[in-house]
Amino acid sequence: MRVLIIGGGGREHAIAYKIAQSKKVTELFCAPGNAGIKEYAACVPIGVMEFERLADFAEKESIDLTVVGPDDPLVGGIVDVFKQRGLRVFGPDKAAAVIEGSKAFSKDLMKKYNIPTAGYETFTEASKAYDYLNNCTYPVVLKADGLALGKGVLICNTRQEACDGVKLIMEDKQFGSSGDTMVIEEFMTGREVSVLAFCDGTDIAVMTSAQDHKRAKDNDQGLNTGGMGTFSPSPFYTKAIDAYCMEHIYRPTMAAMKKEGRSFTGILFFGLMLTDKGPIVIEYNARFGDPETQVVLPRLKNDIVEVFEACVEGRLSEIRLDFEDNAAVCVVLASQGYPLSYEKGFPIEGLDEFKDNDSVFIFHAGTANDQERIVTAGGRVLGVTATGNTLKEARENAYQAAEKVTFTNKYARSDIGKAIDEV
Ligand code: AMP
Ligand code: GLY
């Protein structure tokens, strides 16, 4: 089989690594890819939003299956373009990807189908949002309706902060048209867990759990980022919680989407919060999480291409997912200053050390080739993932490996997986 991956971050590097293990795959391509993905795939310089050019490439190269990584092309309708041209593609179409593309849509869906989530109101006029803030309990959570690179959520402790937030989102248009509509949500507390699942439109196969670390600094301080590290499995996500979520969240979401005429095929990502009153959905994503994928896929035993094909062909019920009985931790190495401004172009040393190591994986996120060298080219530069028999062992291995990879202005959180110590 000839397979094309769309995207060029750490998530796509982890997907490429996993697809490259498949017995079914003879040729692997990635558009645009990155300096690390080159090890597994021929990288093609076409951007993720250039749908027609990507489809031309898939046609010309007789690609048997295209796997889409990022949210922007999915929400933009890349799957519809590929399908219209008779190309086989793994991912939700535009009608289904709206579950991530519009927070107002996903909140209304949960309300309509009794899927547990935080209470909320939706606003399309700033004046009504300001009125609402006069009479609500603080903190509140403001969410721009559309995609905002993970930055469109503001937790506001006072009315003044919330008013500033409404101005930023709805009037100053900090996130562009993503802020034309806004959701104001009840503030909830509890542990967060990320659960990714393969979906074929009807059936759902849930993967092992993971926990992200979204804030830039230790002890969950600093700004929200795309994710500074992950571990898998989450020891807090018990069998009982899994069973509850299957009955009240996962299957009802699949059924709801089908009923709405938006059957979901692809990866559905449940951002859960384990509250005192039980698990609730904080958000849905219509794709693999990043960096969650970097700790989940190295633990997956199945041939991932077989699972992708089962999803596309509507026969996911034939597949039984199987995960290693181990653990994985990913520490993100970022450029100092991320998620705000940072310098790039610094050479990265120490990458070769792990080439033949089957328990350490260095997934590239923001890297580039500069002649013979690999240099930093983004905010999140690399994800250093290590496995171990236990979470503690995996964490030790990940931090040891992370020490050995160096570049100017390297920054990492030192407390990824700290929660493990509370178990
Ligand atoms: P989201 O992009 O919707 O996942 O939100 C980003 C982060 O904001 C989440 O991972 C949570 O940490 C936090 N958050 C979102 N919604 C709420 C909420 N209703 N209550 C408390 N924290 C929230
Ligand atoms: N790590 C969270 C996300 O992928 O949205």
Image (cartoon, grey):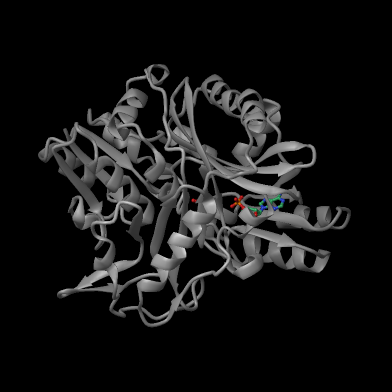
Q: In the image, residue 104 lies at what x, y percent? A: 63, 42
Residue at 82%, 65% (x, y): give it: 158
Residue at 76%, 49% (x, y): give it: 188
Asked if residue 392 can be seen in this view, the reply is yes
Q: Is residue 402 above or below residue 419?
A: below
> What quarter of the picture does the N terminus occupy?
top left
Front one among 389 and 10: 389
Q: In the image, residue 273 lies at what x, y percent? A: 67, 44
Residue at 71%, 27% (x, y): give it: 114
Q: Is residue 328 above or below residue 106?
A: below
Q: Is residue 145 left or right of residue 387?
A: right
Q: Is residue 241 left or right of residue 258?
A: right
- Residue furthest to the right in view is 135
Q: In the image, residue 197 lies at what x, y percent? A: 48, 34
- Residue 409 quadrant: bottom left
Front one among 399 and 228: 399
